[in-house]
Image: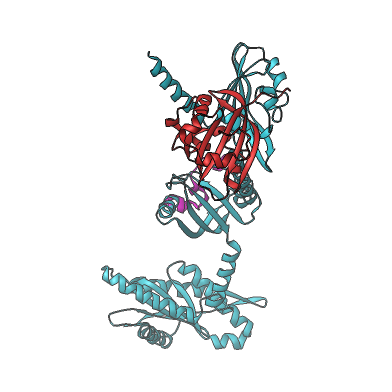
Chain colours: A cyan, B red
């Protein structure tokens, strides 16, 4: 190799070592520095201004006063004797953290690797601070569950909020799909998956619904699912915040009940009945398009000789008769229709989707059930009957005309001897 | 007549000096623009550092040529102070061996050039 080439290569190597961003320094057992790159001077000169950097123990004394002892105590011919030890130094009113590693590279020569990790430490501190803050939130929120799920919806970590919210223990939830928090029906419908897909598209979705506690109890919740972007912009998971809305739900349900029902009997009030019937007609218009033959129907029901009950047994007995009628109707109707107290002792039963034979059968069931009721009064009890008019919507019917036809049928039932069902034409 | 390392009128001479005149000096001279780019690197400095002027000229001195000076003792003083004439004992890691040096930091208010003079010194006796 020519001398010129060697010089060029040496210069290139020198230039390379000049800009290595890590301090590298070799020193012998007595601390004498053999080689040091510029970063060593950059990092260590501020610690010993005016110093010479000729002895590693002197130069590193402000950071690691016991280095000489540690070097001498290390008896192996090679190996790591100081491993990434972080040392804090203050110069120029600034705190710096240097990470120091010392290797024995062969008998009697040691290599120190010195890195400025001040910014790394600051980042770690911030990260740790964030973790602590989040931990504090997770651990201390009440009425909320906050947790992270991965892209598949599996719960990543347990935290106190899950314990407090639903009684969940780590082994119940970690690694399991967060669908387990929703009520079983929704779990079947893969509700969790749908929520995540929507959150992935729009960034965040909000939903309200039932969730279950570990003990099986249901809680009404509001949940917000937010996609968590990774540093490269891709989504790495989701954060789910669920809030216990049971109290609000109970209150809302109570308000709705108060607004829609008759306080004495618990049947729907007239205003709610009108709205329900209007809804039934609207739904029917759609059904007709779909080719469904069923129609809305109504029954008008009137307790026979109600005035006589009041006169003979008193108004409390009259009220009891009304309540007993409603109870009997509710147990017969189930989900088939809505019972409305239309006024006084007159009730309207709305069958949103029925046919003449089914409506008549329902009316007959109601009549029979009411006739079976014994209303307690004083030491005894009395019986009562009811008359029922039936009408099922035909072409051109509207809610008013339908009720009118049922009323006409009811009138016919009364005149036909009461305790009977008459189907309107 | 070339000025000595500690000559108080040094900067005026340097501003007028030719490259040949700088090369004749016994101590190292690095000439930089006001933002630290090397525009002059004399022979004494090239001999000390082992770097040919061609490798150094046009580069940023404190980050790309002599990172050993990129701290508050040297680089930040050039950066922050409008005028400088201070001498500090320092250590250069020339050819990766620590060499005690004396540095003279020269900067004149509003001038287009800054100068760093480098002279070998004897180590302190510990």
**Res A419 visible:** no
Indicate whether A349 appears above or below A7. below
Q: Position of residue A54 (x, y in %)?
A: 65, 22
Indicate whether A252 appears above or below A179. below
Q: Position of residue A171 (x, y in %)?
A: 57, 39
Q: Quadrant of the N terminus of chain A?
A: top left
Q: Residue at x 57, y 73 (%)?
A: A255
Q: Quadrant of the C terminus of chain A?
A: bottom left
**Res A290 visible:** yes
- Residue A39 position by quadrant: top right
The front one of A279 and A297 is A279
Indicate whether A26 appears above or below A246. above
Q: Residue at x 62, y 81 (%)?
A: A317
Q: Residue at x 41, y 17 (%)?
A: A6
Q: Position of residue B91 (x, y in %)?
A: 62, 28
- Residue A258 position by quadrant: bottom right
Span highlighted in magenta in the image: A170-190
């Amino acid at each position: 190799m020519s001398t010129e080439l060697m010089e060029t290569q040496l210069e290139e190597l020198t230039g390379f070592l000049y800009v290595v961003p890590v301090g590298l320094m070799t020193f012998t057992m007595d601390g004498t520095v053999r080689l040091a790159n510029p970063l060593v001077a950059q990092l260590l000169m501020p610690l010993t201004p005016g110093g010479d950097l000729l002895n590693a123990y002197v130069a590193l004394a402000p950071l690691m006063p016991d280095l000489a002892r540690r070097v001498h105590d290390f008896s192996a011919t090679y190996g790591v004797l100081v491993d990434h030890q972080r040392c804090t130094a203050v110069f120029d009113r600034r705190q710096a953290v240097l990470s120091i590693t010392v290797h024995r590279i062969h008998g009697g020569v040691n290599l120190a690797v010195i890195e400025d990790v001040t910014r790394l430490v600051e980042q770690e501190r911030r990260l740790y601070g964030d973790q602590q803050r989040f931990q504090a939130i997770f651990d201390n929120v009440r009425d909320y569950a906050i947790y992270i799920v991965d892209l598949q919806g599996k719960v990543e970590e347990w935290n106190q909020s899950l314990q407090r919210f639903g009684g969940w223990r780590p082994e119940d939830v970690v690694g399991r799909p967060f669908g387990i928090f929703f009520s079983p029906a929704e779990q079947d419908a893969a509700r969790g998956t749908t929520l995540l897909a929507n959150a992935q598209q729009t960034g965040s979705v909000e939903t309200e619904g039932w969730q279950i506690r570990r003990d099986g109890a249901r809680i009404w919740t509001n949940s917000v699912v937010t996609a968590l972007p990774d540093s490269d912009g891709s989504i790495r998971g989701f954060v789910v915040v669920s809030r216990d809305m049971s109290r609000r739900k109970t209150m809302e349900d109570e308000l709705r009940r108060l607004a829609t029902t008759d306080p004495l009997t618990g049947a729907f009030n007239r205003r709610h009945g009108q709205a329900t019937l209007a809804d039934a007609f609207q739904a029917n218009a759609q059904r007709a398009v779909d080719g469904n033959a069923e129609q809305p129907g109504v029954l008008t029901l009137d307790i026979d000789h109600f005035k006589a009950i009041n006169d003979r047994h008193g108004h409390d007995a009259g009220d009891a008769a009304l309540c007993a009628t409603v109870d009997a109707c509710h147990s017969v109707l189930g989900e088939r229709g809505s019972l409305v107290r239309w006024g006084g002792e007159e009730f309207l039963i709305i069958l949103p989707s029925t046919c003449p034979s089914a409506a008549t059968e329902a009316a007959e069931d109601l009549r029979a059930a009411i006739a079976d009721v014994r209303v307690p009064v004083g030491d005894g009890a009395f019986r009562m009957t009811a008359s029922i008019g039936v009408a099922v919507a035909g072409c051109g019917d509207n809610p008013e005309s339908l009720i009118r036809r049922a009323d006409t049928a009811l009138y016919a039932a009364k005149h036909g001897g009461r305790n009977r069902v008459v189907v309107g034409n | 007549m070339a000025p000595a390392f500690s000559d108080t009128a040094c900067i005026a001479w340097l501003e007028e000096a030719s490259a040949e005149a700088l090369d004749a000096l016994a101590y190292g001279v690095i000439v930089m623009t006001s933002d630290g780019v090397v525009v002059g690197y004399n022979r004494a400095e090239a001999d000390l550092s082992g770097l040919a002027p061609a490798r150094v000229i046009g580069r940023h001195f404190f980050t790309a040529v002599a990172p050993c000076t990129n701290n508050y003792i040297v680089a930040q003083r050039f950066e922050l102070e409008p005028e400088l004439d201070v001498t500090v004992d320092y250590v250069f890691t020339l050819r990766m061996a620590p060499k005690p040096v004396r540095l003279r930091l020269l900067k004149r208010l509003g001038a287009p050039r800054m100068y760093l003079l480098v002279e070998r010194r004897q180590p302190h006796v510990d």
